[in-house]
Image (cartoon, rainbow, N blue to C red):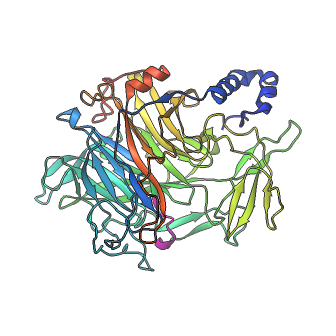
Amino acid sequence: MRSARFAFIPASLLSLATGCSQHGTEVVHALSQATSGPPIVDARVETAALHSYDDAPRTPDSDDPAIWVSPDDPGDSLVIGVLKDAGLQVHDLQGNVLQTILPPNRPAVTAQDPPAPGPHPESGTTACPDSASGETYGRFNNVDVQYGFKLIKESGAKEKIDIAVVTDRGCDRLRIYAIKPTSPGGPLIDITASAAPRVFPSQLVQPSSLQPTGVSPGVYSNDLDDQNTAYGLTLYRPEDSDDGYRAFVSQRNRSAVAELELYAAGDGKVSYSRVREYRFNPVFTIPGTSPWSPPIQWTPCREEPESDPQFEGLVVDQQRGVLFAAQEVVGVWRVPLSDALPATVNVSPTRLIEEVRSFGAPWWAVPDDGEYACEDSAPGTPVSGTIAAPGNPWAGGSHLERDVEGLAIYYGDDEDGYLLVSSQGDDTFHAYDRSDPSDHVAAFQVEDTGETDGHDVVNVPLGGDFPYGLFVVQNGKAGGPASEAPINGFDYDGSTQFKLLGWEDLADELDLDVDEDDYDPRDPHDD
């Protein structure tokens, strides 16, 4: 973990800029962005807005995208985007919907319910098989793709296929799809083994000492209906193909990431098994507020005191074998991978490479209907039961505003490139040097885009529309419907979509490199 850094941009930064020369350049840069704002880049294509209605059955809410590169015609490449309760959709590079896939376990939708992708009305299927209440259904959260997976067909013959893998947060499983655009039922075909297990049948609980719940730290069984389930996702193809393809999956409401191995289960199906779990301590030792002050044991405020600080955005550097993980209210971690690691890895806090601005700052947890409202300052009117946590306002980072969400890697020549991070709290994106991710290269925004959950990027040409690569972002601030009135008693709850940008548009605006031919996502280890 780096030493204390400046968290805010007001007058306090002005005085520090003159008093701490080692931080002078960073402060001046932050002040410049605070007054002028980061550059804004326009999208070339956007998908149709989808409108969400609170608690409505199968209501769409786009989240994470993944880009699949066609081996035959790059212009026929696809953008796969998850829609949470509504499953996922597959788009072409013009933003048209080619396919809608609904969660296998889904509720009924009536003709009077708000519009939703897929059949409407529909009788639905069944609840998730492990739902004790019978009221928990599938909910797709994150997606990633990989190339050249070795499948064993029903005949016993082997076939190399491209795959898309999705976290089904509702049922706590992975859903695996073969990517076959020209096959009947394509472009995506479900090849998940029927016996695919839960990803997190147990949960590591690390309660906050400042917001006691009466629960002791430890590993407990994990009731599916509590939804401490599979959340963020990224895929990894090790250089040694004998190691098998890996999926890294974060657990909702927990500070843990599972490493799974994908394997051919026979009969043309794919399943997975647990390899190891990475555990992250949510308590950090930060410097005191003066050279004479003792260190402070700090942990983030928790709106739900029984929950731990969670991860969602994940990406593996395919060439270096390094996992980057975004812990939403903490920051970005860098974790080297190795098959020599034990079944349980307690990740060192030194692996935290970029803190959010509010990291380490004092906070106040104000009781709010059985939960807490987390505040950065004391409430103006005292509220009984408020918890005040000590901290150091200068311990945080300089660039990312909580929540930190999506991660992606732009691959360049000789293992150069950029780690791209979405800072949801202030609707910005950030580029870090891939070789030295502590080096912040640029910040930017996408026109009329905010509350971004996930994004993806590829460096290779994708036809005439994206000849130097493609950057896709989820937009949580899409235009709303003609009327925002409730439908069938369900309140309107926002609109989402995906936007497609040419990489050269970002590169020109931000003075970033363009390298469209030194990395092949189909063969990441080709020198």
386 drawn magenta: no
Q: Which quarter of the picture shows residue 112?
A: bottom left
Question: Residue 26 at what x, y percent from top left?
Answer: 67, 25
Q: Is residue 346 above or below residue 441?
A: below
Q: Is residue 145 above or below residue 61?
A: above
Q: Say if residue 358 shows up in the picture.
A: yes
Residue at image position (27%, 71%) is 122
Q: Residue furthest left?
A: 155
Q: Which quarter of the picture shows residue 128?
A: bottom left
Q: Is residue 499 above or below residue 230?
A: above
Q: Which quarter of the picture shows residue 309?
A: bottom right
Q: Nearer the viewer, residue 389 or 416?
A: 389
Residue at image position (34%, 59%) is 87
Question: Which quarter of the rendered picture does the N terminus lie within?
Answer: top right
Q: Say if residue 235 shows up in the picture.
A: no
How many labels, in total?
0
Question: Residue 32 at what x, y percent from top left?
Answer: 66, 24
Residue 386 placement, left or right of 327: right
Q: Nearer the viewer, residue 308 or 78?
A: 78
Question: Residue 399 at what x, y percent from top left?
Answer: 62, 34
Residue 157 placement, left or right of 470: left
Q: Which residues are magenta?
A: 224-230
Question: Which quarter of the rendered picture does the C terminus lie within?
Answer: top left
Residue 79 placement, left or right of 220: left
Residue at image position (20%, 36%) is 71
